[in-house]
Amino acid sequence: MSSRILNWFKFASPATFYPLAGTIGRAAAAVAVVLLAVGLYMSFFVAPTDYKQGEGYRIIFVHVPAAWMSMFIYVVMAFWAATGLVFRTRLSFMMARALAPTGALMTFIALWTGAFWGKPMWGAWWVWDARLTSELILFFLYVGYIALQGAIPDVRRGDRAGAILLLVGVVNIPIIYFSVKWWNTLHQGASVSITKGSSMAAVMLETMLIMTFAFWAYAIAVAMARVRLIILERERDTRWVSELPEVAG
Amino acid sequence: MDSVKAFFHMGGYALYVWGSFGVTALLMVAEPVALARQRKAMIRRLRRLIRLESEYSS
């Protein structure tokens, strides 16, 4: 048992993780490119026209994956924040930091595409509906976290303060998820549910899932690239960084 | 030609469909490009630091 724990902590060392993050990032980027190509092709050429919303419904193929990722990335960040606070592993905080801009980006895409879908279908770019409002709060949580990290020059204090913000903000995630059930919202209910299965045509669901995995792979690829930057920044005075082939030249 | 036109017309939803996919694509291209640039700048900075150090110690 103790040897297994030791093995895990080995990867918590930035020097060990740096090359591994490079490999994971490159693999994820390749997967993302392939899945995006397939997913986009299916979004426009395979998935049929919707009987109610015509071609307008195709926005779902970016809207839902982005919205899922916006929540998922936040949960992953909160996980790293908790891990960092409990085990005092520096890399955990770096992972949380590395994911934040991508989480904010996914939230922005979810809100933006939501507005572009709401306008033709509901007649409004924005409504103060529970789902939309809680997603907007999620965006502010990401922005607040990034701003907080930028405002605290001391890395350790910044990491801890950020981690606490992330853990407090995690209550918003179930609120977003269940908002369509708990309140009467203009936003439609879940099209895919664990308990009830899917209410969509099979090919539409497949396209949406492929796009979701594509966004997932994309998020892993960019987060790995960003965590490598953070590692270099924080470890710049160490010997292993100066001996890296890309730095030593 | 007409089918291409019809494709971009998106059954009258062109603004909404392309406005969604377009902005998403733009952001998901911009982020990796920005990261690649930041990495280049970071490596340049690290090389300069190492050079300065070696000059200082010699």
Image (cartoon, grey):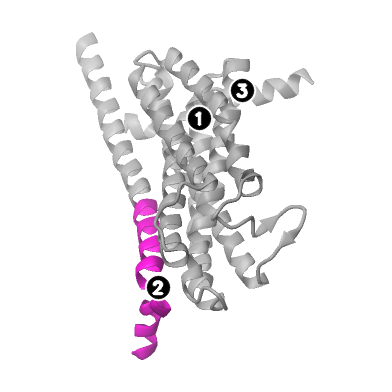
- In which quadrant of the rendered view does residue A48 lie? bottom right
**Label ID, residue B13:** 2
Please rate how many residues cluster around mark 3, counting C-alpha atoms within 10 Å: few if below 14, some from 14 to 19, many from 20. Answer: some
Most common SS among magenta residues: helix
The chain ID associated with circle 3 is A
Furthest toward the bottom, the residue is: B2
The chain ID associated with circle 1 is A
Q: Is residue B58 visible?
A: no
Q: How far apart are the alpha carbons under marks 1 and 2?
A: 38 Å
B4 inside magenta stretch: yes
Extent of the magenta region: B1-29
Residue A121 picture location, percent across and down: 47, 66
Please rate how many residues cluster around mark 1, counting C-alpha atoms within 10 Å: few if below 14, some from 14 to 19, many from 20. Answer: many
- Judging depth in this view, the residue of A175 and A101 nearest the camera is A175
Q: Which residue is mark 1?
A: A96
Does residue B44 appear to the left or right of A54 in the view shown?
left
Q: Which residue is mark 3?
A: A83
Residue A217 picture location, percent across and down: 53, 50
In the depicted structure, whether residue A134 falls above or below residue A37: above
